[in-house]
Amino acid sequence: MAPETASAWLRLIRAEALGNAAALRLVGHFGSAQAAVDANPAAWLRAGVERGSPPPGADDPQVQADLAWLAGAGNRHLVHWNHPAYPERLRGIVNPPLALFVVGDPGLLAQPQLAIVGSRAATPQGLDNARAFAAELARRGLIVTSGLALGIDGAAHQGALDGGGATLAICGTGLDRVYPARHKALAHALVERGGALVSELAPGAGARREHFPRRNRIIAGLSLGVLVVEASRESGSLITARLAAEQGREVFAIPGSIHNPLTKGCHRLIREGAKLVESVDDVLLELAPQLTAWLHSQPTSPPPGERPATSEPAGLDAQSARLLSLLSDAPVGIDDLVAASGLPVELVNILLTQLELLGRVAGHAGGYQRREV
């Protein structure tokens, strides 16, 4: 992003008391952030926004500090409303963020993902469940999203890394710091292994109580669904689940002992309509239509020299059929399937999950093999 473009968006972000909704109204009216910050108060009023004080200038110390932070490393990004990497799933939520600060790969924002959230004071069993579910979801090709908090969040991020996948940490502070500090090594590891740290808060923003509900709406908005592993009746994870339900996302919950206070929130969610989950397949079966829609939306082309198939197995799209044709009775590894199909690894993982749920392939330690139907 050109520095002058970043500067205009940062001036809107730093404008006192403007807010996301008003800033987006201005950008929509004027066509760009630069035109919005250059417009006079009368023009803002015609756009439906009363300007109490002008946005900070391009030479404002905070704006300059933000620009310096963005330029401080090649993996720091400002993904604003008009940026091609701004995720479509966020555009439709109530009060969508004007922009997201990202450390890591911004391309992950649009990938299919499941949020895993729960108690900060989790039980050993809850931590094990979070790690195990995250690891398997990552192996199946989904991004695991959480809030980098202690307890279930941290276990989910670590599980995704254990499963060889990427994970998104949505933060309630500016990305110039890691909160909680105990997760500094985890935050660095998830970026180094292909994930990302994400926040709508500018550098310098600390850990304030009101920041975390804002973070939770982004966790819910980015994801296809939210899995609550452990939660008390007063847990902040229930806020994330409620926001997910309001945004039309799937809500999942793992049940537990009636004597464990950290399962009370999960049982309440299940009574209110959340899907009871015992395995990763329970999640994937519910998400299958959304995963299929996402796969069909991805532009793909056959590898060089390969002709399109003239016919496809019944009930399968061209991508799934191509992958199925590469399988036989002997297990074939993921890397070999990626190389032979010419498809991205995340697509191959999700296609294999779909085919496995359909009973067309079987997974083994050495890879996947075809099942005749």
Image (cartoon, helix red, strand yellow):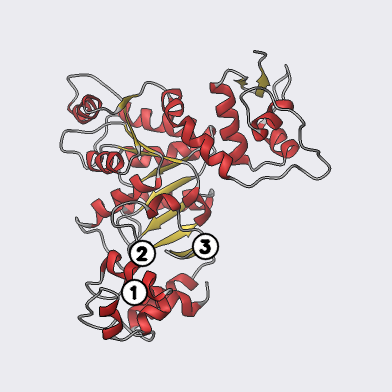
Q: Residue at x 49, y 53 (%)?
A: 191
Q: Position of residue 6 (x, y in %)?
A: 45, 74
Q: Position of residue 149 (x, y in %)?
A: 31, 46
Amino acid type of the residue tagged 1 in the rendering:
Leu
**For residue 298, what is the image quadrant?**
top right
Please say whether residue 71 is visible from this viewpoint. yes
* Of 134 and 253, the residue lying toward us: 253
Asked which quadrant contains residue 48, the reply is bottom left
Tag 3: residue type?
Answer: Asn
39 and 182: which one is in front?
39
Residue at image position (44%, 52%) is: 88
Mark number, residue 75:
3
Q: Residue at x 42, y 54 (%)?
A: 197
Q: CA distance from mark 2 to mark 1?
A: 9 Å
Question: Residue 85, which numbered label?
Answer: none
- The answer to whether residue 7 is left or right of residue 55 is right
Q: Amino acid at mark 2?
A: Leu
Q: Helix, strand, or loop for circle 2?
A: loop
Report if the CB atoms under discs 2 and 1 are less than 8 Å apart: yes
Nearer to me, 196 or 187: 196
Dot label at residue 98: 2
Residue 208 image offset from top left, x and y in percent: 21, 59
Residue 12 badge: 1
SS category of the residue bearing label 1: helix
